[in-house]
Image: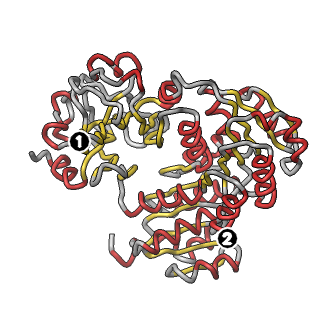
Amino acid sequence: MSANERQHVAVIGLGNFGMTVASELARRGCRVLAIDTDPGRARDAQAFVDTAVVATATDPEELATIGVGRTRAAIVSLGDQAHNSTLATLYLRRLGIPVIFAKAINEDHAEILAGVGATEVFYPEKEMAVRVAQRVGSNNVLDAFHLASNLSVIEVAAPTEFVGRSLAELDLGRRHGIQVLAVKELIPERVVLVPGPATVLKDSDILLVSGRDAVLRTWGATGVERKKFVVVGLGGFGRNTVRALHEMGHDVLALDSDPRAVDAVRPFASRVEVVDACDRGGLEAAGAAAADVGVVGLGSHIDVSLLATMALKKLGVAPIIAKAVTGDHAVILRQLGATEVIQPEKDVAKRVAERLMRPGVLEEIPYIEGYAFIETPAPGYLVGKTLAEAALRRRHHTAVVAVKRGFGANEATVPAAGDLMVERGDVLILLTRHEDLAALRQGLG
């Protein structure tokens, strides 16, 4: 493709998510075509993108006229407008855009977006909810993230019962379907990639572990005292937080002023109540003061989220994790008593921008300098070999985390056992260094 035709990216919808993606792409030197129906948003974006236009994303002729078909990728972020984002994704596919990232508002919407042509679908509120739940619902989990629809990775401090035992003795793969990808040793300070079975864990070690979502959620909470959580606000973030905490075995009180939102979480909450989040007396009567941890998921209603955070603080709930939609909102939440503030759309938007600028990179590893999770088609020379025969760790300092069977597959084979044979069309999820990837793809080394 020529640089003049396909070197830039279209961002459709300039809410918080779209504006952050556009800004991050522009900061990385990418040419950005920003599109929104709101003249004010388009004017704000014009300050940092190459081109910002006022246009309707559900009009295919208009999209063609403004040059969307000449971009190499597109991001669809139309807020809560599920119908509009679905149509926009469909029209982008018809225009021949090879890469389409789309933001979903729920699981059904995500499935529809993938069906009409989105090459990758993001659901920021669910991703962040699961990440937060795994962190606060466990004594040991430091961070968590998704690599595939059924595959997660967690960063976890070595559990007490693991200390002094070898990986062979623990046998986590057979017992739990869990793979230890790396061990960060603090004494002496070093990182061991794909540690051998003889590795003995110390109490200061931090493990990087992969496995199926459901397995890691329950495994991470094993031995953890059952906590009481209150979740105020049951939109996408709040609803998914309730569900994840419930699956980890915790006691969850779910509160919202909308009876429909309350009914939606009733099957997986310990207790539910219809309560005005601004009413401290109502929150107290519902039992919020007894919670060990408070979660405020009312980000889109800034005034209500501020009042709910302040109310939980006065009721003695601590810590309090609150969702914000802007930087200023985050600052005020902290001033009012939030212990931690998360911004799901901003966090995921930055990752989307990174994925577009560095295709195949799923996630950087903060404490393993130079390493990242990479998704790449299986090289031809590996087809017909087992993972053990491929010996990627020895030859390329690379760990095979999982295998997706076929292009476009969402689920991965977890864990990636040594006797798994690589087939034509497989996609490998690897933990590797960028400089080793080219040699791996070419079969060098």
Q: Please say if 349 is above or below 363.
A: below
Residue 35 position in % (x across, y down) = 60, 73
Is residue 284 or residue 445 the one in the foreground? Answer: 284
Residue 351, image x, y percentages: 47, 57
- Secondary structure beneath dot 2 equals loop
Is residue 244 shown left or right of residue 33? right
Q: Residues within 10 Å of mark 1 (few under 14, many from 20)?
A: few
Is residue 423 depicted above or below 18 in this figure? Answer: above
- Quadrant location, the C terminus: top left
Instruction: Please identify the quadrant where the N terminus is shown.
Output: bottom left
Is label 1 in a helix, a strand or a loop? loop
Q: Residue at x 79, y 37 (%)?
A: 288
Which label is found at residue 56? 2
Q: Which residue is outermost to the left?
A: 445
Q: What amino acid is labelled 2 in the image?
A: Thr
Tell me the residue at 68%/43% (across/down).
318
Q: Are marks 2 and 1 in contact (CB under 8 Å)?
A: no
Instruction: Compute the Cα span from label 2 to label 1.
Output: 58 Å
Q: Is residue 222 visible?
A: yes
Residue 138 rendering spot, x and y as whole percentages: 54, 32
Residue 153 visible in the shown view: no
Residue 67: image x %, image y %? 52, 75
Left or right: where 429 falls relative to 251? left
Three-letter code, disc 1: Pro
**Residue 387 versus residue 231 in the image, above or below:** above
Q: Quadrant of residue 423?
A: top left
Front residue of 180/19: it is 180
Nearer the camera: disc 2 or disc 1: 1
Image coloring type: secondary structure
Q: To which residue does mark 1 refer? A: 188
The tally of labels here is 2
